[in-house]
Image: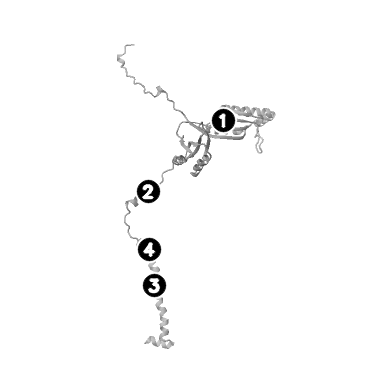
Amino acid sequence: MLRQATWRQRGLTAKSCTLIERPTTQLIPTRLNSSTPKLRRRTTRHPFAHLVPQSPPSAEEAVNNILYNFPPASPSPVTRHVLNCLVSNEPGVLSRVSGILAGRGFNIDSLVVAKTEVPDLSRMTIVLNGQSAVIDQAKRQLEDQVPIWAVLDYTHAKIVERELLMVKVSTVPHHETGKPGHELSDSDSDSDEEHHDLSPLLGASVQRQAVSELARLFGARIVDVSTTSVIVELAAKSDRVDAFLKLLKPYGILEATRSGVMAMPRSPLNIGDSDAPEEEVEAVDASLLPPG
């Protein structure tokens, strides 16, 4: 009754009062929403309250987890490999072999292919660096190709390995003592005067003689001589060829070409008496021997 009196004093009816009370009923969810952050704060204080204890994993899941977390094995070292392929003498074989090796990321150091004594057969010698496991996979992939008859690995075999080098060396003497910013000592000035006193023809002869002596020490031979250069030919192992080029560099290398590595396995020495087992010599008692 008191509330109705206040409504009449304000000039409000019951219908209008009901319209005013409706928003009050809609404020209830807002009050609930205002209390929800408090509940969230309480849940965040206990992060493990909602966790349910899990059942132990099965044997298969445990094994898979152990295998997944197992540290990978250390990679095998990169070694030098020599492969010898017997292929058919037909076009397109070289592109197939190089494409297979390039697809596996190999950098071919040397590749030599030529005919053999059989007209329809060619021999291909490949030198590359890589891990042994990856090289074995590449070998099996090469053997599956139709034009390739066999793939031989000479990496751990006893072979005769040779590489042909042809290098053109300058015989014109050049003096580096007159560089700007280089102070000449008394000995340098004397040697410089001696070099300038020599005629160009005599200086070329001295340098040609030095190159010839170096070639003789390495077992190389001079195949061409001109007034300004000589061409030296050397057939040796790759390491020896590299050393020879380093020693020729101060003289001035004009051109150089290398054929690549060629390899052939050594034949075993089958000597009849060496492989036969030695006869055992019976021990002789020294007391049974005559005196003296």
Which label's residue is closer to the chain start, 2 or 4? 4
Residue 292 placement (x, y as % from top left) = 34, 11
Q: Tags 3 and 4 in contact by the CB under 8 Å rule?
A: no
Which numbered circle lies on residue 2?
A: none
Query: Toward which corner of the image does residue 251 lie, by quadrant?
Result: top right
Tell me how far mark 1 sits from mark 2, CA to CA.
Answer: 55 Å
Tell me how far mark 3 sits from mark 2, CA to CA.
Answer: 51 Å
Q: Amino acid at mark 2?
A: Leu
Tell me how far mark 1 sits from mark 3, CA to CA.
Answer: 96 Å
Farthest-out residue, left = 288
Residue at the disc numbered 3:
32
Q: Secondary structure at mark 4?
A: helix
Query: Which residue is pictured at 37% across the width and 65% down the height?
Result: 43
Instruction: Select label 3 or label 4 by which is in front.
Output: 3
Instruction: Select label 1 or label 4 by which is in front.
Output: 1
Residue 222 placement (x, y as % from top left) = 60, 28
Tell me how far mark 2 sits from mark 4, CA to CA.
Answer: 37 Å
Query: Which residue is pictured at 40% across the width and 78% down the height?
Result: 24
Q: Pointer 4: residues within 10 angstroms few (<14), some, or many (20+)? A: few
Residue at the disc numbered 4:
45
Residue at the disc numbered 1:
234
Instruction: Select label 3 or label 2 by which is in front.
Output: 2
Which label's residue is closer to the chain start, 1 or 2? 2
Which label's residue is closer to the chain start, 3 or 4? 3
Residue at the disc numbered 2:
67
Query: Which residue is pictured at 58% across the width and 30% down the height?
Result: 233
Q: Secondary structure at mark 1?
A: strand
- 95 displayed left or right of 191: left
Q: Amino acid at mark 1?
A: Leu
